[in-house]
Every structure is written in structure tokens, then in C-alpha cells.
Image (spheres, rainbow, N blue to C red):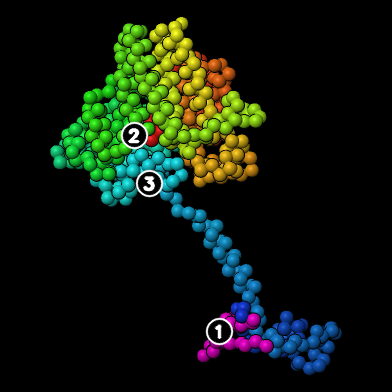
Amino acid sequence: MFTLSLRKCTNLVRPRSLSTISIFNHSATMVFRGVPSKACKRCRERRLRCDVQPTCGACIRANVVCSGYRDTGQLRIKDESESVRRNVLIKKSAATSNAPSHLALSLDVQARESFFAHFVLGNGLGTSGAFDFLRKFHDPTEAPEFLSLTIDAASLAYLSHQSYSDTALLRAREQYTVALKATSKALQSPDMATKETAVMASLLLDLFEKFTNTERQELVWRSHINGALALVKARGLQKFTDQSSLRTLVRLNTNLIISYVSTDTAVPEDFSIVRAHLSKYIDTENPKWKLSGLMEPYANLRSDIHKGISPLECLFRAMRLDGEFQALSREMHDKLQYKTTVRTSPSDMVYGTCYDTYLDRHVTQTWNVLRLTRIMINEFITEACPNTAAAHTAFKNIQSLASKICASVSQYVDCAGTVAQLQKTGSPGLSRNFTCFGECVSHLPVQNLACYTLIFPMFVVGNAKNTASPMKIWVKKQLHYMGSHFGIRNAEIVAQILEQGKEVSPWTIYSLLGSYAWGA
């Protein structure tokens, strides 16, 4: 019925030697048990000499019923496949339980990989890629030591901010000290100081400061970005022509203008020179490029108001600047479109009766930066000349702009309602980012990031003097929800600041949130 193959025995008998039997193409483990005893059961157990007669003499003398004799031919081979399988599984289970499920990565490695995933490599899931000029330095051995150290410092600062980890923050500060010394030493070399990597290191040190210094300290906030600008000037703009170096300049352009806006400081003339150089190589019709250009006169207006200008000058400059922002808004409608949906039933997660949906968080953020800037410009107008026609128009502008910011929230926050509905209709801005589970979604880091970038615009709405009371209440409620539902601690903190009703500069909150580190 089946074929038995046994190992040949040489000089010694090898008990429990294994052989294989093929039964209907299945493998079984068979054990040769040696020559079995022919004695009856009682004689075997007592190790007595059995006469193996039809009636066992030993059993007769003991006056017991003999059990009889076994068929020894059937006992030579035993199928122990199940026993062997069971023993192997037990050993495997024990080995698995004693071994870690994965190799633990060091904090530095985790931080670096997270930083590159979000800021450098990008992955099509809404991540930034704002520092993509660092791509070639993903391998630490490819970067000069001082640059690699600054990458590590910024990476750890990013991880500490993302995970609220004091351990990562402490490690980040230690690494920053080492990186700062190494960078300072490298810049003492005239040759090294004029390399593109020196500018990159300064931008990374600036990013570190934005992550870790949550108070607006004017000199600290601008020290590294000013250093990067000086290094660009020393190297010469004519050397910034390839894709990587141009991307470095674009990042400098963005970070520099926001640093000056947020510290009420006029923008240096070198900024305009850098933009003029960049305009030769990039799409100057891009709405984000035009928006960053309008931020320069806005920064200068803030600086002059801070120094003290007449209300009339403030009014004229603010109205002219708001007109330019409004014109850009009309242009953006053609290039960065969004869809407005009117709800048929009310929802606590939607302010009013409608909400807007955008392609992704980058488009949403571009629109909201324009809106929140216009809100603050129009507040200059209402404060400079109250009870005038200009102030009345500014008041209506603020109401309209604030409503549009609120309408942008639902797409990212309303898991059970708007998000789920958008997934059913196959919204391109959501289908690759979120996964529905019942009435909610799995909160991937990209969704938390999208929610995080809403906090500052929402604060501007909730903090503005000319927004409606119901709108302020709704904003605070949404911030509380983001804190509890998404675990975004800073959303809860900002909600509490609004509830305290104290006069707080929006740019103080901006620094608390990590500045442009999250908006890149």
C-alpha cells in the first residue's frame, strides 16, 4: 500500500531513526522502534521472563488473567508525524516569544527617517518635500559632517514636536550644540563657506529654532535665516542655477519672508535681489510665488505700524495692499479651484450651511494664508479709521474671509460626515490619504498634519475683533475636538487661549505652533 524506506544500520542500532513514507503525495515522519518484546503485558511491566505459551506460566502462578500477546509485526514502525509537528511548533513558539518582534531603531535613526519622509523625500501622501534639495544626503555618509549633524538636530526637533517627546527634545538640543560648533568651524574655511551645503546647514539650524523656540524672540528667530542670506550673497547668486540650488533659494525665500512678518520687521533689500534671480528660472505666475511676493509689503507695513505711522497712512497703505491680495484671490480661483457644497441638514461640524473641498492641504493652506493675511490687513483699516465707509467695508471683508476659513475645516476634521461622504464620491484629495472604518477614519500622520495647519487660521478667526460671536464659539469647539479626537495637544492649548479672552498676537500663536516648520 505504501513504500517504506529505512536508513541502513551499520555497526550500531540507531533507535528512533527517521524515514519518510509517501502516502498519496503527503510526507509523514515514521520512527523505527527497534525489535518489540513478544512477552505479555504483565511480564513486560515486571520485566519477567515470559514463556510465550498460549497460557502464560507466570500469570497462572500469580492467579491472574493473562492479557495475551501483541502482533509485533505491527509495532516495528510507528507514525509520529503529529507528535513531531507538535514538538516543532512548541519550540518555534518558544523561540518567537523570546525574540523581539522587530529590531528597535535608535531615536536618532527614527528621527532622521521621519524627517526625510516628510520634509525631503515626499511620498504622494500630502507630505511636504520642502527640503527636497537634501535628497542626495539621505545617506549620512554622503554629507559633510557639519551638514549631517544639522540634519540630525532638525530631525530630532521635528520628532520631539510631533510626538511631544521630552527625551527627543533633550537629545535634539544636545545634537544642536554639536552641530552649531561643527558648522561654525566649517564656515571658518573660505572654501567651505561658499558651498551650497553651508546655506543648507543654516536653513536646517533655522528650522530647529522654529521647532524648539515657541516664543517670538526677534534676534533668535532671524539669526540663522539672516546667516543663510549672507552665505548666499558670499557665494554669489550666479552659482545658484541648477535644480537643487534653486530649490534651496526658494526655501530661503519662503522662510525669510515669514520670519520678518512674524517679528514685525522690515524685509532687507537682499530679499528682493534673491527673488529677482529666482524669477529667471521659476514659474512667476504660480499663485504661491505671487503670494510670497505680496508678503513683503505686508511685512513692511507691519514694521511701520509697529514703529508708529499715522492712521491715515496706515489706512491708505492697508487698503492698497488689500486690493492687491483681492486681485490675487481672483486669479487663484482659476488655478487653485475648490468646490462649495451646500448641506441639506445642519451639522455641528460645519459652520453655517456649506463647506468647501480642496484638492489637498497645500491648496487649502495657500488659500487660508491669503485669507488670514487679509483679515489682519482689514483689521488695520477698522482700527485706523473706525466708523467710516472704509471700516464698514473692511468689517464685511473680515466676516466673509473668516467664513471661508471655517468652510475649509470640515474636509479634514469631520470624520463621520464630510470626510466619509467625500470618500464615497471618490474625492481625489482624500482617497489616497484616509481610510474609512465605520463612522470614522484611521488618522494617518498626513491627516493630523492637515488638521494641524488649520489651527493658526482658526485662531486668527477666533481672535479677530470683528468676527461674529457664534463663529468664535464654533472655532473653539472645533479646536477642542481636534485636541480630543485627533490627539493634537496644541489645538487644545489654542482653544484654551481663546477662551481666556486675553489679547494675544496671532504671531505669538504662530511661533507656539512651530512657525513655518509645519506649513512647508
**Rounded to the nearest whole Å, what is the CA distance between mark 1 and mark 2?**
86 Å
Q: Quadrant of the N terminus?
A: bottom right
**Rounded to the nearest whole Å, what is the CA distance between mark 1 and mark 3?**
61 Å
- Locate residue 109 relative to residue 226 in the image: left or right: right
- Locate residue 259 relative to residue 400 in the image: left or right: left
Marks 3 and 2: in contact by CB < 8 Å?
no
Residue 22 part of the magenta segment: yes
| Residue holding disc 1 | 14
**Rounded to the nearest whole Å, what is the CA distance between mark 2 and mark 3?**
26 Å
Point out the tag, 2 or 3, that comes first from the N-terminus.
3
Point out the tag, 1 or 3, that comes first from the N-terminus.
1
Q: Residues within 10 Å of mark 3 (few under 14, many from 20)?
A: many
**Which label is found at residue 121?**
3
| Residue holding disc 2 | 285
User: Which region shows up in magenta?
Assistant: 1-24
**Residue depicted at x 62% and y 69%:** 86
**Residue depicted at x 60% and y 69%:** 87
Front label number (2 vs 3): 2
Point out the tag, 1 or 2, that comes first from the N-terminus.
1
